Image (spheres, helix red, strand yellow):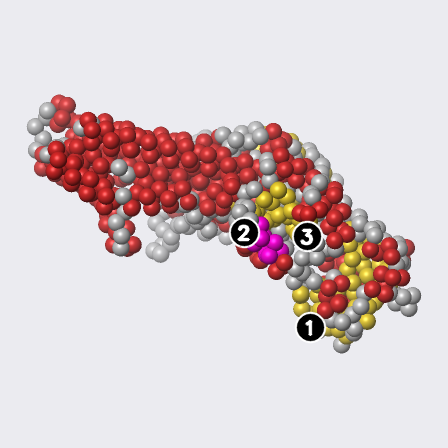
Amino acid sequence: MLLAEARPATRSAVKDPMNQPSDPIHYEVIHTTAGRYRIRIPRLLKDAAYAEQLNWLVASFEFVISVRINQAVGSIVIHYKYSASQASASQAAASQSSGRSDQAKDQASDQAIWLKLSTAIQQASQIEMPAGELATKDEFRPEINWIERMGMPVLSLGLALLVQELLLPIPSLIIGGVVMAASLPFMYRTVETTLKERRLDADVLDALWLGLFTIRGDYVAPALMLSLMESGEVLRDTTARSNERQVMDLLNGIEQFAWVERDGQEYRVPLMEVQKGERVVVYPGNLIPVSGRVLRGTALIDEHKLTGESNLVSRSEGQVVHASTMLLEGKLCILVKRLGHNTRLGIAIQMMQAAPIHDTRVEDYAAKIANQTIAPTLLLSAGIFLATRDVVRAMAPLHLDFSHGIRIAVPSTVLAALTYAARNGIYIRSGRALEMLARVDTIVFDKTGTLTQGNAAVMAIQPADDSISPLDILTYAASAEQGNTHPVAGAILRCAQEQAVQTQPCETWDYRIGMGVVAQIGGARILVGSDRLLLKDGIEVSPIHAAYPHLKTGSHSLVYVAKDGELLGVILYSDPLRPEAARVVGALRCQGKDNYILTGDSQRVAAHVAMQLGIEPQHTYAETFPDRKVEVIKQLRDAGRTVAFIGEGVNDVAALAHADVSISFANGSDIARETADVVLLDDDLRSITHAINIAQRAVEIIYQNTAIVAVPNISVMLAGILFALDPVLGVVISNGSALIAELNSFRPLFDPGMDVTQREVEVNPVTYADDAEEPLVLAPGLSSI
């Protein structure tokens, strides 16, 4: 492929003799390829109206396919129509002169397009948009207005200090009015909460304290308190907005087109038309549009926007690359594994849109305790006033409100931990899930697709007798398994495809969770699944075991196939363990976790897997239906254990719902992913130990913040009662501690507390489990073993 001729980066406008503004708009061409421009325009950063007008003007050109403005970074990306001969100019180099003439026409057309675009950049500020034209909401997201949020509190503090320190003759009525005006947002939130929930919370004490000190004429303390409180609120909101903006920047940066290699040729197609299993070619300067495995090439990649890490990484054949990362040097051919919402970026966007709950039990307990102390605090204040007649001492207990600081610091800690986890391929749904994950002491694994690779491969087909053809067994099994997403179904369908078997349509189809499939094909009742499925239908499987004893002794698993009440035969398959499984189980054991296996497979296969992983036989449960998995999890919880269950299939959903913490994979079934509290985006079990360490570190910081807020607040209250502590000093100590806790809450972003295992996970390139070669070992002609 020949890229379009790069335009020289320019910092001055191209002059238009027809309608050139007196003040040229500066811009710089960042990057260009065939059919796309990326241009940085500094004016976009500060002029939303210009951005809206430019967006409308460029989109009105008939040659423009799409326009995307990212105002946060001051850039515009334009996709435009181009000639196919231009894209294959490298192949046309040896063509006839007519071919060269076509190429010259293409270049002339491309120059005309550039002239129109550069002129539009200059003229956009002067046009009048038609009525009703609106900018895209996602592109022009409002930022936090610091002046609006902090202006009145800071003004009230400044006036109060001027009067107290410089003794300026400012009327008390004015200062008091400014302080009360600054407190209106806080007062409004307090009244709204009180009326909506019909209960008093600890904010009532702060409101009473502010009001009484303002009425008393001591303005510095309440003004300082308002400034510190609002600073904490703004800091928390800024953190949340920064995380949201980062995700939106990634979304805005994703290419809408991809170069796909088909039949030895490269075609530029819309990203939505790219299919899993296709080959995408990425060139220098482009964002990688899909997640997948490198088939050819070596490249230097910048993953900063996705992971938050500033280090560049090298990727070559066999390694994994992620969507939304930037290819800086080299060229890659990528086998597509994930697209759209299944990529790490896609799930991060879903996480943002789902608005995860950041509350924790610690925060709830603090609020509950603070709310229960309201009446005793008021009584204590009244008693102190009656005993001492000292208003300052009597008002000291009203300042006891550590729940406000915790409400600011704890959500910020959780958000920081969730953000760090998402950057490292771990989606944790909520603060409660994070808190529970830190307490987990028992890990329960499903086997198929969780401990194993999910790349089951058919090893052989054993007919019940010589009159039955192995191909007939495979035909019925593949026909019945059409549309089933279970890994074993995938193995049967791949085997059928290799053997050129023509599947038949199902007249009826019923999936029996944990057992298999019952279908009607050509008027016959077909059963494909475990021996339990056949036994439940009155079909004996013992004769084939008696005839072939080795079926019950090997490490392979079995799928039985029956037709109209008669056993046709058995399909033998093998699903290898994930390469990281043994290491992860060992790491969890070192962390003090007990490991269990629950599987619907036979006791023989379950015991073999447990032996390979070093899991005790008494912790291995075989032939478990979904209800049996739930029963085991309930037994463990009743024994006082905090249980995490890891599964990815439809038959794991009930167990996921009953575990204290449910963990699944991004490429698992949709319902399992929706049910799970934790989703492993990289399909790598090593993320489990990483997630636990992140959670434990975050909870440790949450408890630190609780102490940072609670101890100074209680100390200030006692000092105020016993020593009539100066209110300003009390505000500095109590509300200052809330700000310190808020700053401490950012530590999970930079100090997640990783151990050696986690560092190795981060350094080593991640590989998909389904990237392994898929062995298809069959006896000749699908004959018996």
Q: Position of residue 441 (x, y in %)?
A: 56, 42
Q: Is residue 135 magenta?
A: no
Mark 2 neighbour class, 10 Å CA radius: few under 14, some 14 to 19, many 20 or more: few
Quadrant into which the N terminus falls: top right
Residue 638, labelled with which disc?
Answer: 2
Q: What separation in Å lies between label 2 and label 1 (alpha carbons)?
A: 42 Å
Contact, CB < 8 Å: mark 2 with mark 1? no
Give the magenta part as a residue range.
629-636
Question: Is the residue 336 above or below the residue 591 in the image?
Answer: below
Q: What separation in Å lies between label 1 and label 3 (alpha carbons)?
A: 33 Å
Q: Position of residue 616 (x, y in %)?
A: 69, 44
Q: What separation in Å lies between label 3 and label 2 (alpha carbons)?
A: 18 Å
Q: For the residue labelled by badge 2, is the local secondary structure a helix, a strand or a loop?
A: helix
Sooner in the amino-acid sequence: mark 3 or mark 2: 3
Quadrant into which the C terminus falls: bottom right
Q: Amino acid at mark 1?
A: Thr
Which residue was labeled with disc 1? 508
Q: Of circles 3 and 2, which is in front?
A: 2
Which residue was labeled with disc 3? 621
* Quadrant of residue 130 within the rendered picture: bottom left
Point 26% across, 28% down: residue: 732
In this image, 353 relative to 582: left or right? left
- Please say whether residue 737 is visible from this viewpoint: yes
Task: Please identify the residue farthest to the top as the structure is shown.
Answer: 166
Q: Amino acid at mark 2?
A: Asp
In this image, 605 relative to 375: left or right? right
Point 15% across, 32% down: residue: 392
